[in-house]
Image (cartoon, rainbow, N blue to C red):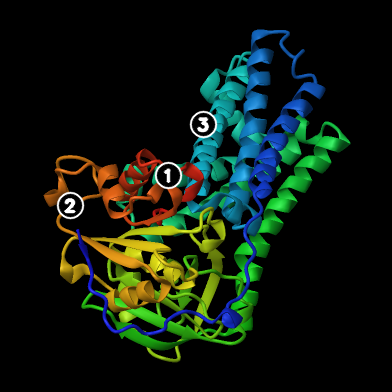
Amino acid sequence: MTSLALPESRDLSVPAAQRHAVRPTPAWWRDATAVFAWATILFVVALWVAGGGLSAFGSLGEGVTNVGRLSGLIASVLMLQQVLLMARIPVVEQAWGQDELARVHRLVGFTSFNLMVVHIVLVTIGYSAGTDLGVVATFVDQVLHSPGMLLALAGTVALVMVVVTSIRKARARLRYESWHLLHLYAYLGAGLALPHQLWTGQDFRGNVVATIFWWGLYAASLAAVLAYRVVLPVVRSRRHRLVVSEVVAESPTVTSVVMTGRRLDRLPVRAGQFFQWRFLDGPGWTRANPYSLSAAPDGRSLRITAEAVGDSSARLATLRPGTRVLLEGPYGRLHTGVRTQVRTVLVGAGMGITPLRAILEELPASPDGVVVIYRVGSQADIVLADELLDLARAKGGRVVAVVGHRNRERASWLPVDSSHLGDSEALTRIVPDIAERDVYVCGHPRWMDAVVAAAHEAGVPAEAIHSERFTY
């Protein structure tokens, strides 16, 4: 571990008048969205009870069908919650952040899918109990003759494809662009299930309250997707008219792209957040890719910095000034608006340093107010070094480089030549008062897990640790 030498300083701080003031996210937003989610589930159960759910157990077949009805109802409301989670609603996005939102998204998605399978199996078994057709023939008969069932079957196939490609091993074999395209079939699956539910489901048509609830929830989900995934990005892209103004090779594999546009001081973004970017430079422009800002927004320009690890990121180096840019966002809670302490530690590995560099620029200056810990495999991997050093000096802070190959013998954020140190011990050696600071972490997910665990062990409270995983 070495402290990088400080060169002649340049003032890279952003004038306060040029920053767009973004209010911190109210703490009650998280509680309110969680209460809404649980309330919709409980309301669905209440509708089932009001429709005679507790008394419909006169026979084995009737009882099995009734339980299948309940599992289908809960699967439906969870599926709509999935749509709302994917709609990029600002309140939800800022309340939970990408880490928690991704975790909840996966949990709700797999739970909804499992309950949907239970619904199909139990309802088919229940219906077959009163006939001589058998389970398979009953299923075929329902698909062919019940209104909307063919569409529902097609929707189920679409959802199966989404779930299979969301399994970690399958997801690891897919490019981000392919996974993102396949994931859009979740919308198709939800839409194809709607006719079956509203045409044949007694719980959807049983009374006025149920009809209003289900139609309202479907309408709200569709409206949220259209508003926040389509309309808002189009409006912001047209309003700000971003174009590429400069492309800078930071290293043989790392490129920075600077974009300028109109009225960027009105864009509600903070340093450390990210956008989904589309560069209108030819084939492939329809695929959006997430990149964090690597410089604090100054009301005049936006900058991203990325390493060429795939086709989309490699294209950044070939962009030409004047290329038009579409943006969707901003997203993420990795920004200064979530700070709980006066002083800060920024811990980044590899390209994870880029959003932290932007956050460093936005932090106020104070003696020993910020420490930057930069983990790299070798000196050649360091990017934006001069900017980090200049900014740290301007803020009254310091930069510590932790250089070396990763330790393969144990899960650790330290390099192999620091194996004699414990993970939390190393943090407290670099920052003795780390327990009294906010800690921002960005890098590879497993490495981040090691840093977060070490920070907890060093006494940093959970609410003072801020991290974001850019995995799909």
Question: Residue at 66% across / 53% down in the picture?
Answer: 26
Between 207 and 12, the one nearer to me in the picture: 12
Q: Quadrant of the N terminus?
A: bottom left
Count all numbered tags in the image, as a single digit. 3
Q: Which residue is mark 3?
A: 114
* 52 with respect to 279 (left or right): right
Disc 3 marks which amino acid?
A: Asn
Q: Which residue is mark 1?
A: 460
Question: Residue at 47% across / 66% down in the picture?
Answer: 272
* Helix, strand or loop at mark 2: loop
**Cα–Cα gap, marks 1 and 2:** 22 Å
* 126 with respect to 464 (left or right): right
**Cα–Cα gap, marks 2 and 3:** 42 Å
| Location of residue 40 with respect to 19 vertically, above or below | above
User: What percent of the width, then of the height, locates residue 425?
Assistant: 26, 44
Question: Residue at 33% across / 57% down in the picture?
Answer: 443
Q: Which residue is mark 2?
A: 415
Disc 2 marks which amino acid?
A: Pro
Q: Looking at the image, is mark 2 or mark 3 nearer the viewer?
A: 2
* Helix, strand or loop at mark 1: loop
Task: Answer with mark 1 or mark 2, whichever residue precedes in sequence.
Answer: 2
* 189 with respect to 370 (left or right): right
Task: Answer with mark 1 or mark 3, whichever residue precedes in sequence.
Answer: 3
Q: Quadrant of residue 399?
A: bottom left
Q: Using the image, tell me which numbered label, if any, was put on residue 260.
A: none
Disc 1 marks which amino acid?
A: Val
* Helix, strand or loop at mark 3: helix
User: What percent of the width, then of the height, locates residue 53?
Assistant: 75, 19
Task: Answer with mark 2 or mark 3, whichever residue precedes in sequence.
Answer: 3
User: What percent of the width, then of the height, locates residue 25?
Assistant: 63, 56
Between 331 and 220, the one nearer to me in the picture: 331
